[in-house]
Every structure is written in C-alpha cells, then in structure tokens.
C-alpha cells in the first residue's frame, strides 16, 4: 500500500510562489506516474501536472509556463513549483500516484489572495 504525504501549501498573494512536496512510502519500486491534481470549492478535481518515472510531463493549459513538476525518484518525492500564482489557483492540491492502482494524498490547501 502506497502512502502519499503532501506539504508546502499555504497562503500567498497574487504573483507569488509556492513549492509543494509529496513524499511516497510503501512502494517497492519507483512509481511509474506521479502528479498533482487540485479541487477548488464547488468544482471537480482537475489535473494540474504529471510526470512519469522517465521524466515525461503533462500540464493543464491553465498552468503551463507558471508551474513546474519535478521528481526525485531516489527519494520517492514529487514537487510542484508554482510561480506567478493567481487567485484562480486557489484550491486543495492533491498528490497522485499510480502503481497498479491510483493513490491519493490527503491534500494541502493553497490560497492565493488578490
């Protein structure tokens, strides 16, 4: 069973930056896919960014050019560097991983004030 623990959320002014981290444990092998999703109040959970074990990435159009996902496979960690934050980025951010099944973290809230 894989456990995911996020950290790094908080409150920041528009234009600011935050870095989220997610540490995975319980996996015997490198997770093939790790990423980030977010859910704003009253909205469905949506993909933010994903990264394969080999380094291929996917980004939501709304965050391209502002967010960067990265991984440290040796430390079972995935990061999300969020720059030029906007109020519409306000959401709970969830770490996500896939290895035979999908795993979710508990979420970390991000609030961007205008």
Image (cartoon, helix red, strand yellow):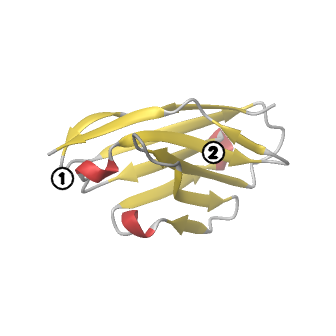
Give the quadrant of residue 84. bottom left
Query: In the depicted view, which residue is nearer to us: 22 or 74?
Result: 22
Q: Quadrant of the N terminus?
A: top right
Residue 11, above or below 71:
above
Left/right placement of residue 18 relative to residue 27 reads: left
**Residue at numbered disc 1:** 15
> Count of labels shown?
2
Give the quadrant of residue 111. top left
Q: Residue at x 71, y 40 (%)?
A: 103
Residue 58 rendering spot, x and y as whole percentages: 56, 67
Q: Is residue 8 visible?
A: no
Q: Residue at x 39, y 59 (%)?
A: 67
- The residues tagged by marks 2 and 1 sit, at their Cα atoms, a distance apart of 26 Å
Q: Residue at x 70, y 58 (%)?
A: 53
Secondary structure beneath label 1: loop
Q: Residue furthest left?
A: 114
Residue 87, above or below 24:
below
Give the quadrant of residue 11. top left
Q: Is residue 90 visible?
A: yes
Residue 93 rendering spot, x and y as whole percentages: 47, 41
Left/right placement of residue 20 relative to residue 3 reads: left
Dots 2 and 1: beta carbons under 8 Å? no
Query: In the depicted view, which residue is nearer to us: 69 or 38?
Result: 38
Q: Residues within 10 Å of mark 1 (few under 14, many from 20)?
A: some
Residue 112 rendering spot, x and y as whole percentages: 24, 42
Q: Residue at x 55, y 38 (%)?
A: 22
Secondary structure beneath label 2: strand
Q: Residues within 10 Å of mark 2 (few under 14, many from 20)?
A: many
Instruction: Please tell me which of labels 2 and 1 falls first in the chain.
Output: 1
Residue 96 numbered mark, or none? 2
Left/right placement of residue 94 relative to residue 2 reads: left
């Amino acid at each position: 069973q894989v456990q995911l623990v996020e950290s790094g959320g908080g409150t920041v002014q528009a234009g600011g930056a935050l870095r989220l981290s997610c540490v995975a444990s319980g996996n015997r092998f490198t997770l093939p896919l790790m990423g980030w999703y977010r859910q704003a109040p009253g909205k469905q959970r949506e993909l933010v960014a994903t990264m394969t074990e080999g380094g291929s990435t996917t980004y939501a159009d709304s965050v391209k050019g502002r967010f960067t996902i990265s991984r440290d496979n040796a430390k079972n960690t995935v990061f999300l560097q969020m720059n030029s934050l906007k109020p519409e980025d306000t959401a709970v951010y969830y770490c996500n991983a896939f290895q035979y099944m999908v795993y979710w973290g508990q979420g970390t809230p991000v609030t961007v004030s205008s």
